[in-house]
Image (cartoon, helix red, strand yellow):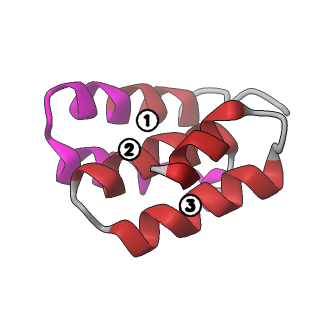
Amino acid sequence: MKPLEPPDSLHLQAAQGWCELHAFAEADAELDHITASLRAHPKVLEVRWQIYANLEKWAGALDIANAIVKLVPDWPSGWICRAS
């Protein structure tokens, strides 16, 4: 998996910071600034899952977890998110 590069990596970091502040709507908006083709990157999906789970959008969170498992089945985080 190729790592994200600026400015996309900076938007991801900003979204993570918003999550730490429990500002999930702001975090979600920050992820929307990431290049459209990279929004399906597993690292982006992990943060999006965190946002959806905290906002109790469970159907969307499950879809995201399933996407993570499909993209990177060897990552435990996708399986853990899917089980939550």
Q: Earlier in the sequence, mark 1 or mark 3?
A: 1
Residue 37 visible in the displayed image: no
Q: How many other residues sit within 10 Å of disc 1, few (<14), some (14-19) or many (≥20)?
A: many
Q: CA distance from mark 2 to mark 1?
A: 15 Å
| Image height of 66 relative to 5, above or below | below
Check disc 1 and report the residue beneath it: 11
Q: Is residue 13 magenta?
A: no
Q: Quadrant of residue 82?
A: bottom right
Q: Earlier in the sequence, mark 2 or mark 1?
A: 1
Residue 27 visible in the displayed image: yes
The amino acid at mark 3 is: Ile
Tell me what residue is drawn at x 59 percent, y 56 percent: 65
| Image height of 53 relative to 80, above or below | below
| Mark 2 or 1, closer to the camera | 2
Q: Residue furthest bottom?
A: 59
Seen in the image, is 13 located left or right of residue 28? Answer: right
Residue 64 is labelled as: 3
Query: Which secondary structure dominates the residues rendered in magenta?
Result: helix
The amino acid at mark 2 is: Gln
In the structure shown, which secondary structural element does the residue marked by tag 1 occupy? helix
Read off the magenta span.
Answer: 15-39
Q: CA distance from mark 3 to mark 2?
A: 10 Å
Pointer 3 and pointer 2: residues touching (CB < 8 Å)?
A: no
Check disc 2 and report the residue beneath it: 50
Pointer 2 and pointer 1: residues touching (CB < 8 Å)?
A: no
The amino acid at mark 1 is: His
Q: CA distance from mark 1 to mark 3?
A: 19 Å
